[in-house]
Amino acid sequence: MINYIDLHAHMVSRTTDDYHAMALTGCVAVTEPAFWAGYDRVSASAFADYFKHLTEFEPQRAAKYGIQHYTWLCLNPKEGEDRELAREVLAIIPQFLDRPNVLGIGEIGLNRVTRNELATFIDHVELALEHNQLIHIHTPHLEDKYKGTKAIVETLASNSRIDPSRVMVDHVEEHTIRMVLEHGFWAGLTLYPMTKVSPGRAIDMLEMYGTERLCVASACDWGPSQPLAIPNCMFEMRRRGHSQQWIHEVVYTNPSRFLSQSPKFKLAPLEQALVQ
Amino acid sequence: MQIEGSCPRTQRELIELEFIEHRTKILDIAAFLDRFDRSIEHNANDDFRIKAFREALAALNSAEFGRVERIQMLLSDLSSELRAERDGQSAYGAAKESEQ
Ligand SMILES: [Zn+2]
């Protein structure tokens, strides 16, 4: 069995049975970006509770299955329209940044590609730079993906303080992957039914662009999604004729290479992970 | 980007592995279009999504490599202006004419 890391999993929305199934299929670590609850939260204190959940309860739940749990904090792009709330949430994030499982700021980005969303995105980028944090980026869906990814890439590329190797631009597809990789960012392929990419298409892009700076993730959340999307994709990779070494590079080495840029990311041996 | 020879399976193997799966997908699309014709009320023949869908199907017939990327662009909002404000939480899957 090949071990893997799921770089994008909204575990607060998943059951403990999902952790069990992920552990059985070789998952050794997950990173959980802060996201939208399905409704717009009304106050910064709701976010404080959420950040507490992400940094206290969730890593303990994961550890019982030998899975290391890391997280990213932000106000999600779906809520970025509310500038007042964004300012309040940005003000409380620094108190959580020193917690042991926090790797950076994310998933920030754009949703419907509005002026306010872009302003909130830029504020988060500034916060990340100020605190020397890694950045995890959500790109918008469907018809908004192309223009939203372009706006994000242009915004970051025009900021000379951004080191692109410390930024993961997630949810890339066939029409956005090139611009992300060409600018030196990491790119994430999301194995999510309907609105993102299938295993077949993710593998196609890995074959054509090469495995460097590319990761796959499930982005499992409260919607129809699959916590076992990575092992499913690994099966497809084998069916496609790829070697164990190639698969290991994509599902384990690459995410650990990106995440290890945070000194907090350390993969413990399973025996140790289980008692943390 | 490498195109030529980047897929490790032969064409014969790809047919054995994937033909039935994609045959099913084509039939599903055909059935969706037939269902659309049989609809109890014809009130969306000019809906921006169905128009984009038909354009995408035409692009599918191209003999030239790069079909996915071209179809992605047909289904994208190609304007570069930011929206003045959020109009809802979800995208539609194709750009409304006013936004192209
Ligand atoms: Zn997400």
Image (tube, rainbow, N blue to C red):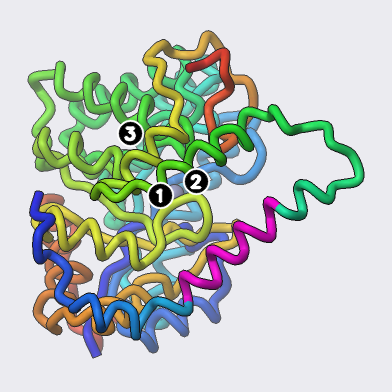
Rendering coords of residue B82 (x, y %)? 43, 13
Residue B47 vertical placement versus A188 (above, below)? above
Which residue occupies 47% across, 35% down? B75
Q: Is residue B42 left or right of residue A195?
A: right
Q: Do callouts 1 and 3 point to residues on the same chain? A: no
Report the magenta residues as a range: B21-33
To which residue does mark 1 refer? B61
Which residue occupies 52% across, 47% down? A50
- Residue B22 falls inside the magenta stretch: yes
Task: Using the rendered image of the protein, determine whether residue A145 is visible from the camera's viewpoint.
Answer: yes
Residue A267 vertical placement versus A139 (above, below)? below
To which residue does mark 3 refer? A94
Q: Tell me the element at label 1.
A: loop
Q: Count how many numbered circles sit on residues in the image.
A: 3
To which residue does mark 2 refer? B57
Q: CA distance from mark 1 to mark 2?
A: 7 Å
Q: Tell which subunit mark 3 falls on.
A: A
Rendering coords of residue B80 (x, y %)? 37, 15
Q: Is residue A233 left or right of residue A134?
A: right
Please, what is the three-letter code of the amino acid marked with disc 3?
Answer: Pro
Query: Observer-nearest residue: B97 or A77?
Result: B97
* Quadrant location, the N terminus of chain A: bottom left
Answer yes or no: disc 1 within 8 Å of ligand 1.
no
Please, what is the three-letter code of the amino acid marked with disc 2?
Answer: Leu
Please, what is the three-letter code of the amino acid marked with disc 1?
Answer: Asn
Few, some or many residues within 10 Å of mark 1 (<14, 14–19, 20+): few
Q: Main secondary structure of the magenta part?
A: helix
